[in-house]
Each structure stands twice: as structure tokens, then as C-alpha cells.
Amino acid sequence: MQSSLYVALSAQVAMEKRLNTIANNVANMNTGGFRADEVKFEEILSLAAKENVSFASSGQNFVSRRTGPVVKTDNPLDVAIQGEAWFAFNGPNGAVYTRDGRFKMNENGDLLTVEGYQVLDAGGAPIALDPMAGSPTIGHDGTIMQGTNQVGAIGLFNLRNDSRLTRFGNSGVMSSIPGEVVQDFNSTGVQQGFSEGSNVNPVLEMTKMIAVQRNFDSAATSIQESESTFMDAIRTLGPSS
């Protein structure tokens, strides 16, 4: 068995997945609050060969938690997080977390994400404003004031490092472990009139794409050479008697 042929093939499978991940990141580099996908690769040790042969796995995706750039918008319903916390909104199957704080208000006063999901407070309840009371003022701790009245507070949640995040829509994630309510606002809070962009570095992603494409081509060349060597050996040895 030509181990090099299968090693090169496993590398191509891994690099194809990496290429798809990079392409998705580049496509969302202007998506508010988007978190880039990364891929963790491992080795699979073959036990069938006489000598140890290492193969590349297809890779496991994970969501990058790096913060994105914050820009000033002056929109009173735009809110950016300072720190590592997340907003939460009411998804179809429970709480979904996001860094995209570009909120809006409907005619009933419900505070919604750009996709139309209800934004949640620290207790997991939807937030409702007074549509007739004018633009809200949002404090560092997420407290929402309209005039002299407090009408709600935007919930902030910390996601544990050991929680597994799965993507929901463009900029939302679902966590295998429920988020923990932020209670200390010394290092964490929100800033009204700002929004956070994607954490994708387009220059870095394009550099990765070029490198992966070159490695993919090198693996393809290796496969062709292995096949050529195998066919030469068959022609030299001739058919078995």
C-alpha cells in the first residue's frame, strides 16, 4: 500500500475544508459582530501500516472569540460591548448570543436585533421600550432610560472558555453551557452610539487562502507522482503469474 498517496489525499481533504472556512470568513468581513471560523487539525495515526503513518484529519471548526473593531455611529440604538461579554436574544430554540449590537425598535416598542429577534435582559426576558418616549439613553451597565424613567436593561453574559459554540445565522452563536450574567461592570460594559464589526482580518485571510491553495496544489502533485511511480512498478514487474 502506498502510504504517501493516502497521506496526501487526507491533506487535500483537510485543506479543502480550510479553504471553505477562509472563503466564508472573507464573505462576512463586513458583517456586524461576525466571529470568524477557525479550524483545529489533528493527526490520525495509522495502525494498519508496518510503520507509523500520520494522516491529517478533516479538522474541527471553532468560533474565534477575538473582538472586532468598534466604530462610532451616533445611532442611539447601536451598542458596542467593552470587554468579553455577549448580548443575548430570543432564538427559536432558546437564548442565542451575539456581539452585534445594532438594535432597532418596532412599533410596539420591542427592542430587536437587525434580524428581528427580541433582545433579552439579564433575567432572560424580552426588552420593551416606550415608542412614544423618544430616543433612549443607555448606560455603561446596560440600563435603558427614557426621560427620567428606567424602562429596562440590556443583559450582558459571559460565555465560559470550555463552552462549545455553534453558529446561528450570520453573527449569533449558541453555547453548550448557558451564559453567566455579568455583575461586575468595572471591566465590562456597553457604549451607546457605537457598533462592533467583524473580527475577520481580510489581509490575513487572503494570505492564508493563497498558502492553502499552494499546499493543495503541492499535495495534488504528490498524488500524481505516487500514481506514476505505482504504474511504473506495475509495468516493470509485469502481471503476476
Image (spheres, rainbow, N blue to C red):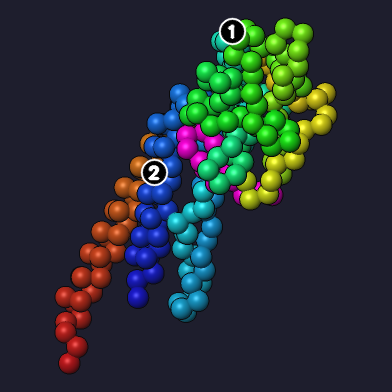
Residue at 46% in and 63% down:
55
User: In terms of image quadrants, where is residue 193?
Assistant: top right
Q: Nearer the viewer, residue 42 or 157?
A: 157
Q: Position of residue 225 (x, y in %)?
A: 27, 60
Residue at 72% in and 22% down:
152
Which residue was labeled with disc 1? 74
Which residue was labeled with disc 2? 20
Label 1 CA crowd tier, 10 Å (few <14, some 14–19, many 20+): few
Among all residues in the image, which is located at the extreme bottom?
241
User: In terms of image quadrants, where is residue 190?
Assistant: top right
The answer to whether residue 165 is magenta is yes
Q: Is residue 98 above or below residue 133?
A: below
User: In terms of image quadrants, where is residue 223?
Assistant: bottom left
Residue type marked 2: Asn
Separation (CA) of disc 2 from disc 1: 36 Å
In the picture, measured across the screen, residue 226 lies left or right of residue 69, that is left
